[in-house]
Amino acid sequence: MKAVAVSAFKAVPQIMELPEPDVKPGTIKIRLAAAGLNPYDWKLVDGIMDGHMPHTFPMILGTDGAGVVTATGEGVTRFRKGDRVYGQVLHAPIGEGSYAEYVVVPENARITHAPEKISLSEAAAVPTAGMTGAQLLEKSGLRAGQTLLLIGATGGVGSFTVQLAKAKGIQVIGTAGSAEEAERLRSLGATTIINYKETPVRETVRQQYPAGVDGLIDLINNAAGFTTMMTLVKKGGAALTTLFVADQHAIEAQGLHGGNFETKGSPASLDVLKQAIDAGQLKVPVDQKISLEEAPAAIADSRERKSRGKTIILINDQL
Ligand SMILES: NC(=O)c1ccc[n+]([C@@H]2O[C@H](COP(=O)([O-])OP(=O)(O)OC[C@H]3O[C@@H](n4cnc5c(N)ncnc54)[C@H](OP(=O)(O)O)[C@@H]3O)[C@@H](O)[C@H]2O)c1
């Protein structure tokens, strides 16, 4: 089967011809319609989980995917052949990812039945970014009428977070790098948009919200940048980062809560997103649809944070 993989940590991803995996007891085999691209995919190539989890090489990239179950192993009860599924196919050992025609995953992996009102290819873009947005908001404790400063609002996670926040009545102050992206953010539901390439974010927020904001979700900054943004949050508010750069003592010393955030993927969390999508309350922010052959170039762009919303890697458009 065709797959995009690396032969070693830090190697350049390449399209390869690799053996189709076989279903084993307790697993399901999925024919993938599409994979969703996430920065985590290349962070794994760089070895972020080296020493924490086993890896296999060639390591097939890709955490998120959607497709159709083609076989179930002995003892499987959650899924049947023909089911449309989506989720994070990533499992131990790392290396059997979603940038491939087929993947075999344990039935208790972070997968569930796919939304019905959208295509499988769009569903592939949802799992990591959607669950991250929903769980960040949950962790922030923000309520209707409160303000959220969202740094990196135009990216995959940001584009889901804006919509989910708006649905809760939270006012989003989001960053965008162009007038076009600012317009897209507004259409997703952001209240205030700051073009971070033209205006200093901290000073602008300070001017427009002199009493501070109720929460900060930072998807971009390093430790120094995050510490700076934290000063904009009112006492008792939340300051969260997805980049593991928070100093927990500094957060508490400032009377805030939050800190480093890690997504906990689960079928239940995916089911909540599926319901919101099928009810028409959540749109998949698709930036581009590309082929497996184009995935290595898209990964290089993602490293430079050039993607807007979600990139979908189409694998089998018959599904
Ligand atoms: N800890 C966890 O469990 C967890 C979970 C999910 C994601 N993450 C991490 O969170 C980060 C965001 O993920 P993602 O999927 O949303 O990434 P992404 O889609 O690749 O983000 C790209 C976006 O970043 C924006 N951007 C670039 N530089 C910026 C700046 N200086 N200020 C504001 N925005 C800027 C770009 O905006 P413009 O186009 O408008 O310029 C672009 O839209 C990644 O590092 C990812 O690995 C962590």
Image (spheres, rainbow, N blue to C red):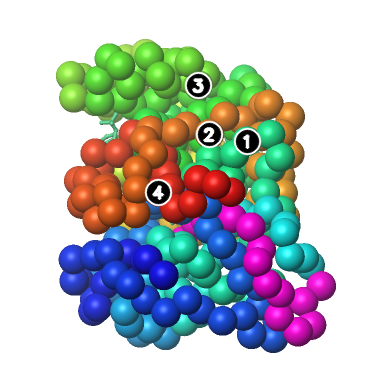
User: Eyeballing the image, is 211 above or below 234?
Assistant: above
Looking at the image, do the residues carrying marks 2 and 1 touch, with CB atoms under 8 Å apart?
yes
Q: Look at 20% across and 19% down and name the residue there.
A: 199
Q: Determine if residue 264 is in view.
A: no
The secondary element bearing badge 4 is classed as strand
Residue 83 position, x and y percent, is 72, 57
* Nearest the eye: 67 or 1: 1
Q: Find ligand 1 in the image and state its quadrant.
A: top left
Q: Look at 36% across and 35% down and name the residue there.
A: 288
Tell me the residue that label 3 is attached to: 188
Kindly report the distance in space between the C-alpha atoms of the residues bearing marks 4 and 2. 14 Å
Indicate left or right for 243 with 279 as reference. Answer: left
The N terminus appears in which quarter of the rendering?
bottom left
Tell me the residue that label 2 is attached to: 284
Q: Residues within 10 Å of mark 2 (few under 14, many from 20)?
A: some
Residue 143 position, x and y percent, is 65, 30
Indicate left or right for 137 with 216 as reference. Answer: right
The secondary element bearing badge 1 is classed as loop
User: Which residue type does callout 3 highlight?
Assistant: Leu
Q: Which tag, 4 or 3, sits closer to the chain's start?
A: 3
Tell me the residue that label 1 is attached to: 118
Kindly report the distance in space between the C-alpha atoms of the residues bearing marks 3 and 1. 18 Å
Q: Which tag, 4 or 2, sits closer to the chain's start?
A: 2
Q: Which tag, 3 or 1, sits closer to the chain's start?
A: 1
Tell me the residue that label 4 is attached to: 313
* Magenta span of residues: 63-77
Looking at the image, do the residues carrying marks 4 and 3 touch, with CB atoms under 8 Å apart?
no
Asked if the stretch drawn in magenta spans residue 185, the answer is: no
